[in-house]
Image (tube, coloured by chain):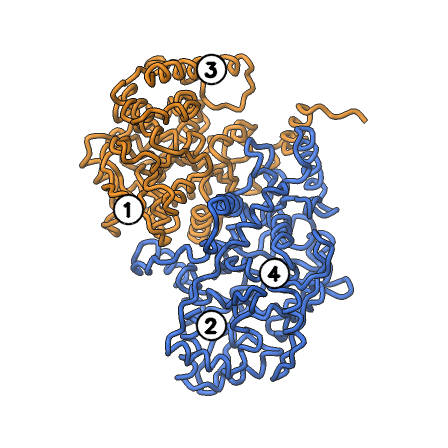
Chain colours: A blue, B orange
Amino acid sequence: MIGRRLMHGLAILLTLAWSHGVMGDMPEISRNAFSLPLAGLSDADRQRFADGRLLFQRSWVQAPSADEVFDGLGPLHSRLACISCHPGNGRGQAPELPSGRLLSMAVLIASAADEPAGSHPHPVYGVQLNEESRPGIPAEGSARLHWHYHDTSLSDGTVAELRRPEVVIDRLAYGPLDNARLSPRVGPAVAGLGLLEAVPDVLIADIAEEMKPDGVRGRVNWVRDPHSGELRAGRFGYKASAATLLHQSAKAMHVDLGITSALFPSSNCTAAQTECLLQQAVETAERVASGRLAYEIGDRSLSELVFYLQQLAPPDVPQQSAESEAGLVVFTELGCAVCHRPSLNLPDGTAVTAYTDLLLHDMGEGLADGHVEHSASGRDWRTAPLWGLGLVARLSDQEQYLHDGRARTITEAILWHGGEATVAVERFRRLSDLDREALLNFLKSL
Amino acid sequence: MNRIPYQVLRTLLITTVLNVSGAPIWAAESDRELLVMTSYPDAMVSRFEAAFESMYPQFDMTVLWRQSADAMSWLELQNHGGVDVYWAPSAGNFERLADAGEFAVLANSDLPFLLGKTTLRHPKGLYAASELAGYGIALNPQRLTELDLPAPETWRELSLPAWRGQLVLPAPTVGFAPVMIDIILQTYGWDAGWNLWRALAANADFSTRGGSFVTDGVGSGRYAAGVTIDFFATTAMAAGEAIDFVYPAFNGFNPAHIAVMADTGARSAANAFVDFVLSDAGQALMMHPDIRKLPVRPHVYDSQPTYPNPFLMTEQSDFSYDNKLGAQRLDLVAVLFEEMIMAHHALLRTAADASLWLQANPASVISESEAMSLAPLFERTSRQDSLRDAQRQQLRSQWRSSAGEVYRALIK
């Protein structure tokens, strides 16, 4: 096993070596694999897709600006653009080094003092650490990840090194971050979300009701949609806390970029952040005085953004080869497919081959973050879609999996599964080399 | 309650970021905090940010994003709004700021001075080129085959009748377009260049949105060709889009620049960032598939011999772009394009054959020397000046009217 310091050094070297071309070129195919539109868009819809793409990719700016579509950033924010945390519409990355900044991931914050613990924003720092800010307004703090390692063995004696992140925050600008639960999360891939949005609530509910083996349960995260007011089956976000892309997008704009909208008309400043509140108030007054809407992303722009996300095609899953079919058999026999359902069928017969049931599952203490989101407990996570899994290693600068990028291989990701997945993981540990290879090849084919 | 006057609110908005005690509150707590203003896309900036901080973990970089047209209003604030480094493709802004003494002399100024006639660094070291962009033609090979059109080798070929309706051009409001317009003017001469633009416009639709919309149009097959800046096309190609890109003969490369603000409170960090961008590692990072810029250090191309090399292309060409000349007049060139061409696009297209504009060769509404004398009037500035606004409006109206008269007479 390679020592950890050497690994850190290699991470730097590999980053620089890649940029020097020393590693040689990775096949430059499908770099836009997560960015293609669904087939069959009309010319008008293609234009709308392109308009939404601009909103997703462009950096937002602080007011006042001549750029009135894109002004209103902050005063407190995590990054400048949606694509910052969803690079190439794919996954964000956790920094490998303790000195690395969280450039495509966020640190969610919840209060541990309220009941139930982890269910409310922190009274001073709110729901997410805003590491960036408008010049003149103090940013909330600076986060780093320290990795803690431990080994685990498979039945055949193979040792796998696992790691988990510890969030360390310094330069706190608004007082101590007491009684807080921190949850670092990389930006997830955004391709195929329109198809997930189209899955009927009743289908998700029916899946939850099904009897499942091996102690697997699965629950719907019923959430109140802020636009319609209806109680809906959540499916977006790591804990399925949003049912629609409109809600998820508006929430992300608000929390990550400090952009207000009709759904989130107030700033993301907390009561303790008086300079932030003052700045936001002045900006809002200026907007209104100049005849603009009080909130920063208009309904039309937001709907274009949502349209873009809805029309992003899922990564192309090639037809299974004989080799990957053998892996699918292993996948099914282990029990993975109970939660990572190969397909969800829409009412029109479209098969959404996302490998998810969109349900919450208790994943055990190892992955728990202590954050409560509606009916999702601190140990619950929505089953992650596996489509595009095989592209992670090819398109991302680093191969990382799970919500916080802790897993550097698919094997590590599997070994972190606990709770309802315990029985399936035990079967995985007992796999022969051959079956394990078949399983991994199958997963890399997705 | 009385409404607060708009201008008072605007002033209040700007001044709330100033420390009421007089000290600049955005002054770095220490030299470790670096504020970089840029207009580069996130895919590029985030990579540079990560690589820089990896190499210099003692510094924290924050990015202030601003379109080039919008940058000056921030940089004209007290202490440049806290900006330490300005890094952007905006020749006009860099010229104005350098002339105003707003930049510090760079510690690292060892780039080649010239690439043909293209200046890569300020003669007094106040700014340096950080990357180059070339201009060319994105092509849809399938459409070319269907239309039996050869890949063009010159700009002029796009004015041929066979290209009617098959071409997309960027409107001058698209960031890279003014330089593109000026390259044609410098290549063919002032009057001949404007006439070529008329002929191209007669064959084309205009894309008024962001730069990637030209390659979108070509990639979708709606157009067989589109005039664009190279990195939009080459990143799309690297992403697997079925388009080609050619650098036609008589081309130019336009540098983007980087500079340290003279009053930076983070000089070590600022110099380190400039050093990194201009280092071999930084220049090689420009070749990342998601960035696809052209490095300004010739030897960096040795590691990727098939990568487009502007140094080789300039050696082999009879033309290179005078970016110093261009920087003086880009704003005016964009305005002339709007008034002489965009405003009369429908009229230009009524000509049965786009080559009418080349054959007739009408004189431009103003000569090149007149343009150079009027260029300062049209420089973008955040300052309100109703007199200048009125002068500009009058000239624009005059040019639009004159151009229309000439076109109508020729079409008859």
- Give the amino acid at mark 1: Glu
Residue at disc 1, secondary structure: helix
- Is residue B304 visible from the viewing direction of this image? yes
Question: Circle 2 marks a residue in which chain?
Answer: A
Q: Is residue B219 above or below residue A374?
A: above
Marks 2 and 1, how far apart at CA: 46 Å
Distance, label 2 to label 3, CA atoms, is: 65 Å
Q: Nearer the viewer, residue B306 or B60?
A: B306
Say if labels 1 and 4 share a chain: no
Image depth: mark 3 or mark 1 in front: 1
Q: CA distance from mark 2 to mark 4?
A: 22 Å
The residue labelled by disc 1 is B146
Q: How many residues crowd mark 4 within 10 Å: few (<14), some (14–19), many (20+)?
A: many
Decide: marks 1, 4 in contact (CB < 8 A)?
no
Mark drawn on residue B397? 3
Could you tell me if residue B62 is visible in this image? no
Position of B176 with respect to A121 (left or right) is left
Q: Chain of mark 1?
A: B
